[in-house]
Amino acid sequence: MGNVVVLSGATGFLGSAIAEELMRTTDARILALVRPKASRTPYQRLESLWFERPLLREALGTRIQSVAADIERDLLAISPDHYAKLAKDATIVIHAAAEVGVTQSAERLWNANELTSDLSPCQLSPCQLFHQGLSAAKDSSGAR
């Protein structure tokens, strides 16, 4: 089985560019964590936001799976069983999500941009974690 990349921030500029590069240069499956919105499913959000990225749109539902998740909530706001499966399958976690709202509280900005405790399924299985807010990558042991 090849790499399985868990990607936060797939709806943003950096996350979608990372997803596109992964599609071009690897055979990895991508599990795109997408915050649910009342009016659209995570799949519909990616399909709409990736309208100018045909490579990503064509892979949506096959190599790229959308996962309803919220990095600011416990266990990413998914069931413990689903989280355990995500942790078992993940070989790489890329945290590219960012909150950029200037009217947000410092705590909300910190939670979205720096905290990765529940984002890191690496706690349960060996994988690599890459974080856009840090200058270094580290493995699940915390080594740099």
Image (tube, helix red, strand yellow):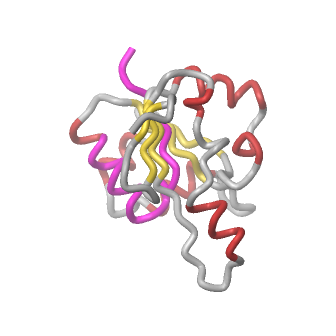
Where does the magenta region start and end?
1-22
Residue 25 position within the rendered picture, expressed as x and y whole percent measured from the top left: 21, 38
Up-down relation of residue 20 to residue 109 (above or below): above
**Residue 60 is drawn in which quadrant?**
top left
As drawn, which residue projects farthest toward the top? 1
As drawn, which residue projects farthest toward the front? 143
Residue at image coords 66%, 60%:
111
Q: Nearer the viewer, residue 74 or 10?
A: 74
Determine if the magenta segment contains residue 9: yes
Q: Is residue 108 left or right of residue 21?
A: right
Q: Nearer the viewer, residue 47 or 6?
A: 6
Up-down relation of residue 106 to residue 110 (above or below): below
Up-down relation of residue 84 to residue 50 (above or below): above
Q: Nearer the viewer, residue 87 or 137?
A: 137
For the image, the number of numbered tags is: 0
Residue 43 position within the rendered picture, expressed as x and y whole percent measured from the top left: 56, 48
Residue at image coords 43%, 56%:
134
**Residue 45 is drawn in which quadrant?**
bottom right
Quadrant in which the C terminus appears: top left
As drawn, which residue projects farthest toward the left? 25
Up-down relation of residue 106 to residue 24 (above or below): below
Residue 47 position within the rendered picture, expressed as x and y whole percent measured from the top left: 48, 55
Q: Is residue 138 visible?
A: yes
Residue at image coords 58%, 38%:
120
Residue 78 position within the rendered picture, expressed as x and y whole percent measured from the top left: 74, 39
Q: Nearer the viewer, residue 92 or 16?
A: 92
Quadrant in which the N terminus appears: top left
Determine if the magenta segment contains residue 123: no
Q: Is residue 5 visible?
A: no
